[in-house]
Amino acid sequence: MREAVKKSRRRINSIKMQETACGLHCIKMKNISVRVGEQTIIEDINLHIHCGKISVIIGKNGAGKSTLIKAILGEIKHEGSIEFSDLKNQTMANLNIGYVPQYINMEKNTPMSVYDLFAGYISNSPIFFRKNPKTYKRVQEQLGIFEAQELIDKRACDLSGGELQRVLLSIAVTPVPNLLLLDEPVSGIDKNGMQLFYQNIAKLKSNFDLAMIIVSHDFEFVREYADHVILLDKTIVKEGNPSEVLESEEFKRVFG
């Protein structure tokens, strides 16, 4: 009996140590490669992504950043594996991914409101005939996470870049994913919008148990907010904390 208790304690302590090091879950990407015919787009990507951390992918145009995001989303065929470990329950689990694209195609003068756009993602019933009071309240609460609740009745096509981003962030964390992907999130956003974005990223990191992968060309953001930086040039040529990557010879070679 005592030996069983000791084993149980050792197991609990092991889980606690892992949670301290890695949070409640982690994502491992092993040998991710994408090839089109004889052309290699990305090759042998190996990453260990931790929840509660912001990982930022940087690289020049054509380095394979968008291809890697599409591979993670399962939108393109790839070699290798992506594993999600639930350390709290010591199990392998399905990976729930939230995604904020760089832009979405939306026709000008489209009558769809923010409520319509959001409810279309979270409701199984038709949304254009009438507003469901419970769904409306839920959408408003989720938009409120990113101070966007006042946009609920606004036409989605009339949103500024920063407003649309806040709406897409709200959708992406409903429900809260294990991994949140953001592709060039400050593209086309003014200075005030960028500042609000930085605040929202800090809020996500502080209040949500999720991992974040962000594709960015904003090295000021990378230096201030990233926990882990991945320099991509078809494969990973350098990774580490912001200083280790941004001050490296590999960075100078890629961006020099």
Image: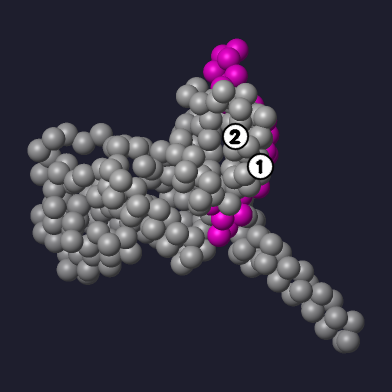
Q: Amino acid at mark 2?
A: Leu
Q: Secondary structure at mark 2?
A: strand
Residue under the image location 49 percent in, 60 percent down: 205
The magenta span reads 30-54
Q: What colour scheme has been applied to the protein in the rendered image?
A: one colour
Q: Amino acid at mark 1?
A: Glu
Residue under the image location 69 percent in, 62 percent down: 21
Nearer to us of marks 1 and 2 is 1
Per the image, is 78 magenta?
no
Q: Which residue is identified by label 1?
A: 244
Residue under the image location 19 percent in, 46 percent down: 159
Could you tell me residue 170's position as x and y percent? 33, 56
In the displayed structure image, the side of residue 40 where residue 188 appears, left or right? left
Magenta stretch secondary structure, dominant: strand
* Residue 44 visible in the snapshot: yes
What distance separates the C-alpha of mark 1 from that of mark 2?
Answer: 11 Å
* Residue 94 visible in the snapshot: no
